[in-house]
Amino acid sequence: MTHLTTCADAEAVAARAAAEIARELVRTGRRGRSPQLALTGGTTPKRTYELLAGEDIDWGEVEIWFGDERCVAPEDDESNYRVAAETLLEPANVPAERVHRMLGELGPDEGARRYADRLRTLLTRTEQSLPVLDLILLGIGPDGHIASLFPDSPTLDADDGVLCLGVRDSPKPPPERITLSLAVLRAAERCLLLATGAGKADAVAGMLAEPSRHVPASLLRRGRLTVIVDDAASPRAARG
């Protein structure tokens, strides 16, 4: 069952999300292992990252991953890494060796291959198992996409053993991207999805409806999914 929380506005969503992420990282650390956190891009998480940087977290113990990346240089304005670096990684002094960046500048195929190799090397226990991230932070597009998994895309049909995929035909620019596979998203201990603004209300409603390739977010594992939205993006707003 998906856990849905509705907040008054975008600032409240960011505060709730930052507190939720901090609790999860501390909880995982108390189990005696390094928390594995995957970040997302887009505009929605920026304020969450700013607030998270001020939380009392031992960032030297946290491994940082990414759910997707645009195929641009890391200093490019379109780079998901750049957003995370400016709002969280640098302000929180996260050690560089703990940050596993997708190498978007290598292009979708080589970038995806290298990231899959890194995931497999550091996080898989057996040759057949999938890497398990403790928490994956996600946004959602107005079309219901998550990471760079778009509606009705062939990437949704990748074999369960595929960890990372190159995208060449993203419906929103830039067209070339790297993304974690749906299988890796579904294997995570938890996914935390954030949505703000009236433009996301229909997508959130679609995500909570029956699973459909038309709404990739609806394919996440419901029992491991927490959703935090503001009033404007709530399913009630879509019905209204």
Image (cartoon, grey):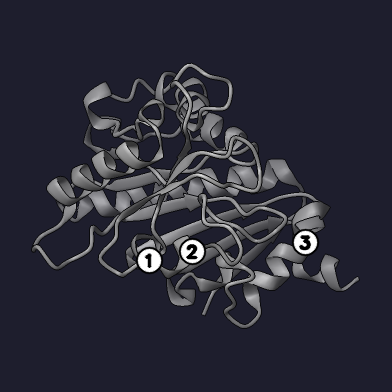
Mark seen at residue 154: 2
Image position of 12 (left or right of 147)? right
How many numbered marks does the figure carry? Answer: 3
Q: Secondary structure at mark 3?
A: helix
Residue at point 68%, 46% (across, down): 12
Report the quarter where the C terminus lies: bottom right
Task: Give the CA distance from mark 2 to mark 1.
Answer: 7 Å
- Mark 3: which amino acid? Ala
- Mark 1: which amino acid? Ala
- Mark 2: which amino acid? Pro
Q: Quadrant of residue 158 in the image?
A: bottom left
Q: Nearer the viewer, residue 133 or 176?
A: 176
Residue most toward the bottom?
A: 210
Q: Where in the figure is residue 156, as x and y percent of width and height? A: 47, 66
Residue most toward the left?
A: 126
Q: Residues within 10 Å of mark 3 (few under 14, many from 20)?
A: many
Mark seen at residue 179: none
- Which of pointers 2 and 3 indicates the residue nearer the eye? 2
Q: Secondary structure at mark 1?
A: loop
Residue at point 19%, 56% (across, down): 31
Instruction: Report which residue position mark 3 lands on.
Output: 201
Instruction: Report which residue position mark 1 lands on.
Output: 158
Q: Quadrant of residue 133 in the image?
A: bottom left
Query: Does residue 14 sit above or below 207 in this rendering?
Result: above
Q: Is residue 197 visible?
A: yes
Q: Nearer the viewer, residue 159 or 50?
A: 159
Dot placed on the residue nearer the N-terminal end, 2 or 3:
2
Q: Is residue 64 visible?
A: no
Query: Does residue 137 sit above or below 187 in this rendering?
Result: above
Q: Secondary structure at mark 2?
A: helix
